[in-house]
Image (spheres, coloured by chain):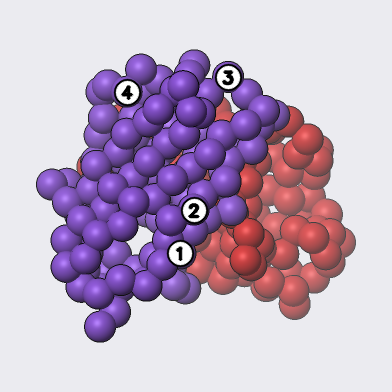
Amino acid sequence: EIVMTQSPATLSVSPGERATLSCRASQSISSNLAWYQQKPGQAPRLLIHGAFTRATGVPARFSGGGFGTEFTLTISSLQSEDFAVYYCQQYHNWPPITFGQGTRLEIK
Amino acid sequence: EGQLVESGGGLVQPGGSLRLSCAASGFTFSTFSMHWVRQAPGKGLEWVSYVSSSGSPTYYAESVKGRFTISRDNAKNSLYLQVNTLRDEDTAVYYCARARRYGLDVWGQGTTVTVSS
């Protein structure tokens, strides 16, 4: 099973600033990585797939990067609606599909 | 884009059973594989099960193998999860989600399963 590890657990950033979230895979997953955003009381929403391709309707301020075992999600200028929990997920070798434990992005 | 609506959750005693349902609309359900993903209170996302567009193959997380059964009825645009021998640790919100080769792109709002005596 591929283990996904996200850091930090919580990130405090001011609106308008840049946020960078990290995700590490326990073995190479090529670019088979997705990012999801989850707001309180809501279902997750697919943001990024293929490590860097934005899903339909996702603003350009969201960008993904990385390959192999190290990945990042960057939000260039934080808006109030971006404060949420973010999960990475690998689909390189499954089952099982595995998610990271999440990064909570909170307002500083 | 599509919509998924789960139902069937509730309060059940340890050892009990439930049948969760997921109604799909707005897309050709029969051409998509589907997943169930759950989220325990205050915790992260845990993949539970997968079914292909035709109904086979199916896959399960080790934590639910032998207790949960995924199925689908393409004529009814519906996905199901039969959950048996429930344990306290099965308490969670259960989401159905549409599978793409690159991730899970459409999610339902979830149905809550609470296992408690």
* Visible residue check, residue B112: yes
For badge 3, the amino acid type reads Thr
Q: CA distance from mark 4 to mark 3?
A: 15 Å
- On the image, the x and y values in percent for residue A91 come to 40, 32
Q: Nearer the viewer, mark 2 or mark 1?
A: 2
In the image, B21 versus B99, the foreground residue is: B21
Same-chain status of marks 1 and 3? yes
Dot 1, how many residues are within 10 Å of its Cα: few (below 14), some (14-19), or many (20+)?
Answer: many
Chain ID at mark 2:
B
User: Is residue A56 shown above or below B21?
Assistant: above
Where, quadrant-wise, is the C terminus of chain A in this rendering? bottom right
Where, quadrant-wise, is the N terminus of chain A in this rendering? top left
Q: Residue at label 2?
A: B7
For badge 4, the amino acid type reads Gly
Mark number, residue B55: 4
Element type where label 4 sits in the image: loop
Q: CA distance from mark 3 to mark 2?
A: 20 Å
- On the image, the x and y values in percent for residue B82 come to 28, 48
Provide the letter of the chain coloured red.
A
Q: Looking at this view, name the residue that lies furthest to the front.
A: B76
Chain ID at mark 4:
B
Dot 3, how many residues are within 10 Å of its Cα: few (below 14), some (14-19), or many (20+)?
Answer: few
What number of labels is visible?
Answer: 4
**Tags 1 and 3 in contact by the CB under 8 Å rule?**
no
First-in-chain label (2 vs 4)? 2
